[in-house]
Each structure stands twice: as C-alpha cells, then as structure tokens.
Amino acid sequence: MTGPGLAPAGGPGALLVVGDVVTDVVARHRTPLVPATDTAAEIRTLPGGAGANAACWAARSGCADVRILARVGAEALAWHSAELRRAGVRPLLVRDPEASTAAVIALVGPDAERTFLTDSGAALRLAPDDWAPALLAGVARVHLSGYLFFAAESRETAGRVLRDARAAGVPVSVDPASAGFLKELGAESFLAAVDGAECLLPNADEARLLTGRTDPADAAVVLSRRFPLVAVTLGAEGAVVATNGLVTARVPAPKARPVDSTGAGDAFTGAFLAARLAGADPAAAAASGCRAGALAVSRVGGRPATP
C-alpha cells in the first residue's frame, strides 16, 4: 500500500471473511402485526448471516476467490456449505459439537423494514483454536463481521485474526453489524476491540452510536480519524465516505423498489470490498456497494440470486 490503507491491495488475491453463517426465517407481513392472534405472512427459510451474505455479494461482484470462516451446527452444515459453494464462496466451516446453527427470524413489514429476533447459536462460539495464521495464505483482504465482537470467545478470535492479518500486511475491514448489540457492548469497548482495522463500514445508526454525532457525515469524519477509511451507509440516500478526517465522497443510491431490506448493508460491504480488491478507489467502491444494496432490497433475503 502507498498510504495508510487508502490504496487498493496490490495484485490479485482472496477475500477472507471471518464471521457468521445463519439460517434466516423471513416472514413478510403485509398488514401490521396483531397481538394474540394470527397475522397472514409469506414465510421462507433462507441461508443468511452478515458475514456469509457479504461473502456471497463479493463473489457476485466479481471477486474470484472468496472464503468464509465461520462456526455452524451439525444440523445445517451440509446445507450451508452447498449454498455457499453455489454462490461462488469457499466455505471454511467449523462444525460445532454442541450448539445449533445461528438462526434469525426476520419480521419484514409492508415498508420493507425488518425487525430481527436473533439466536446466535454456534456463530459466536468461533474459538481461537478455529483460527490459524496459515488461513491468510493467498489472502489480500480480511473482513470481520461485527457480530463476532459481541461475545467473549468470538471477540478473542476476531482479535487474533486482526493482529495476525496486520502482522502479515493484510488490510482488515469491520462491519459493526448491529446497533442493538453495539449499544449493549458499548461504543468504546467496540472501538478498542477493532483498533487497527483499516476500514470501518457502519450504517448511519451504528455510526451515531460510535461517535455520539447525529449527522452521519460528521460521524464518518470522527471515525476516520481513528480508521483510515470509513464508509457509512445511508439506506436509500446512498453512502458517505471519509478518510483521514475529511469527507471525500457522497455517493447516491440507485432508485429501487424495496421488498425486503434484509442484507442491504451486507450487499454494500461485499461489493465494496470486491471493488477495492479490483483496484477501485473508495468512492468508486462505495458506488459499487450502493448498486448492490439497491439490488438486495428488491428481493427477499440477504443473498444475491444464484443459478
């Protein structure tokens, strides 16, 4: 790299995502939920997880070698492995002998906004022994799903990945993942845990929680004094990019007819990282991310369409 994380990784290489693989149960209801009785809904069981979704979108966006390290339960190992391979992602899945695969119930209302009920299961049991520096072979960029930082064991594992990647000269990006969990952990605890990352990819709510600033652009500026590159996603308003204490780009989002907002941020992340690996500057990478996000909200679930 020619600067503190602002130049794209030189030459071809793999993207390694370390994160979560989740079984999503997506319930789309066209009328408000009614307590103590039935509400009609369209319900589908789909592969998901912030890390896995981002990996799939990176593959769909042209990254030829995408890998994911995650922990899953035995009951869904074969299914998730097959779905990842079908999406062009190499699964490095660890079978958990005790816990079930993480599961999320996503309640998606008429406005396409979603509310999650989350059972983290095996995802946050990713253990230090599941990681080895040898997994960095051929890797040009590492991405950490922020969910890993919300439990002690997986936080220790993520910390090791971050340290080993930095020692190997491999840039690391982090998606804070959940405003709700972030609030429980605390902003300073999270920021300390991800110190040394090259790139932070929060949404507007997460950026506000991490900085106390109400304006996402102001929050991006504050965060970019700590992380060399920050891209804050703004939903239908696109994204704002900041580097070294300055806003360097405001990127609009393409118009989309939203069906399900699940995974829109993961789509941005995957496409953004694929573009960076291909040599794009941060603004162009953010534009690629916004295009992927617009595609994501137009379909049900957090993954791109696969053959």
Image: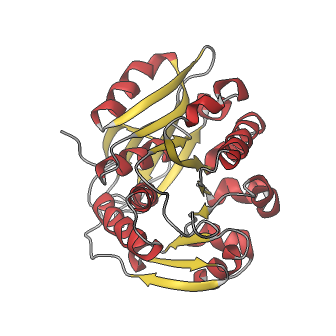
Q: Is residue 182 visible?
A: yes
Near-viewer residue (39 or 78): 78
Image quadrant where residue 108 sits: bottom left
- Image: 49 above or below 210: above
| Farthest-out residue, left | 307
Front residue of 242 and 164 = 164
Q: Is residue 66 above or below residue 60?
A: above
Judged left or right of residue 187, residue 207 is left
What residue is shown at x 39% (from left), y 19% (from top)?
Answer: 78
With 10 as the anchor, is 224 left or right in this view? right
Residue 237 image offset from top left, x and y in percent:
41, 80
> Measured from the top left, where is residue 216 in percent x and y?
59, 80
Q: Quadrant of the N terminus?
A: bottom right
Q: Is residue 227 above or below residue 9?
A: below
Tell me which residue sits at (32%, 58%) in the image: 296
Q: Is residue 37 visible?
A: no
Compared with 128, 296 (above or below) is below
Is 176 on the left-hand or right-hand side of 53? Answer: right
Give how far across and how far down residue 170 sits, in percent: 60, 50
Q: Residue 233: x and y, percent? A: 49, 71
Front residue (pair 4, 110): 4
At x 73%, y 39%, the residue is 160
Q: Which residue appears at 59% of the width and 33% of the height? A: 123
- Identify the residue at the far top of this view: 97
For the C terminus, which image quadrant?
top left
